[in-house]
Image (cartoon, grey):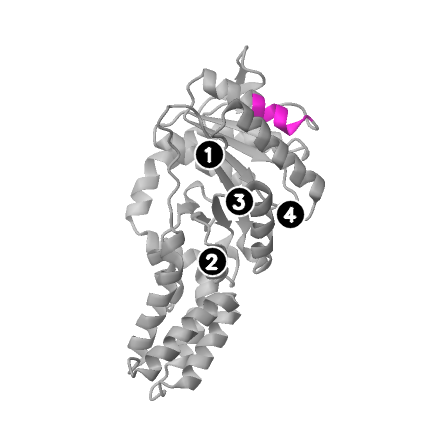
Amino acid sequence: MQRRIRGFGAIYVNRIHPIFTAGLVTEEKQHSRGLLGRLKGALSRTRGSLAQSLAGLFGVGKQIDADLVDDIETALLTADVGFEATERIVGDLTSRLKRKQLTDSEAVLAALKDNMLAILDPVAAPLVAERADGGPFVILMVGVNGAGKTTTIGKLAHQFVAEGKKVVLAAGDTFRAAAVEQLQTWGERADVPVVAQHTGADAASVLFDAFESSRARNVDVLLADTAGRLHTHGGLMDELRKIRRVLGKQDETAPHEVLLVLDATIGQNALNQARDFGEAMGVTGLVLTKLDGTAQGGIVFSIAEELKLPIRYIGVGEQVDDLRPFDPGAFVDAILTRAP
């Protein structure tokens, strides 16, 4: 059910979905039952690729030597950890080996974990969607087709509402016919308004309306969807720049966050996307989705080592609470712990 509010453009206020409300109530309990356990399940493919490979290297009587380090290097590269991150890890292991600090498999695994955390800790930066002046905090979502932008917006809306924030969604994807309907469905579930226009409308105009409406209604967070586009498509990247300019004219500090959504299953190509979107839009944070569907979860290390951009969230499933703030310790434990 939807009702239209006059005076705020095409804004739809949605009644709350009872099933979604149940999810809000249980999320904290589910989290308390063990994020690590859920991550282990979601990252089982990467763990199967990496942890099982590493476990096979530490058999009874296995010598801790340069050959072992070479085998670890191969395992890391196979899991898509990337050349630079792997080189950094292997370089440290080699140095420790020469200093006779790696005396057994436990010491090797501990050193491996230390190196992984050293790469990931600097990019773990939870998103704080708040403004001191009380205006709407604008989050602009960008990325290629199929990366999961709209779904991520819906999940973020759910989380912000659970925190007591007033949220508005902006349907800036005016190219894909089903995009507006998909976003309105998420708006209905989270009980938040959606600003939308017809298919083919000017995306910058939609976001203009959404910002003005959000400011008038004292909204805390404006989540803006955009059309999926290849990072190599100059015309569509220009549209993103136009959106940014329009927002900047309304509020010189907006957007306050440009979140790039990356599909983890595409491996090293995610680096190219991040570089190009970063140059075009000044990306301030990353969301890595579909980590539950790939054995190449090591891409997280590659992105962290080469881009140095904050990883705000990781997506590890279809459920609304499967979008999680990035926790390096839990992530590393989940992929290094061998399945029973």
CB atoms of marks 3 and 4 within 8 Å = no
Q: Can residue 289 be seen in this view?
A: yes
Is-magenta flag for residue 111?
no
Identified by mark 4, the residue type is His
Determine the secondary structure under disc 4.
loop
**Any mark on residue 256, and which?**
1
- Residue segment shown in magenta: 201-208
Q: Which of marks 3 and 4 is nearer the N terminus?
A: 4
Q: Name the residue under label 4.
A: 231
Residue, disc 2: 300
Q: Quadrant of the C terminus?
A: bottom left
Quarter of the image where one finds residue 165: top left
Residue shown at the point (33%, 45%) measured from the top left: 30
Badge 3 is on which residue?
Answer: 260
Crowding near pointer 3: few (<14 within 10 Å), some, many (20+)? Answer: many
Quick one: SS at disc 2?
Answer: helix
Q: How crowded is mark 2: few (under 14 residues within 10 Å), some or many (20 or more)?
A: many
| 274 relative to 22 in the view: left or right | right
- Seen in the image, is 253 located left or right of residue 325? right
Task: Specify which label sits upstream in the sequence, 2 or 4.
Answer: 4
**Vertical placement of residue 276 versus 15, above or below:** below
The residue sitting at 45% across, 57% down in the picture is: 304
Residue 204 lies within the magenta run: yes
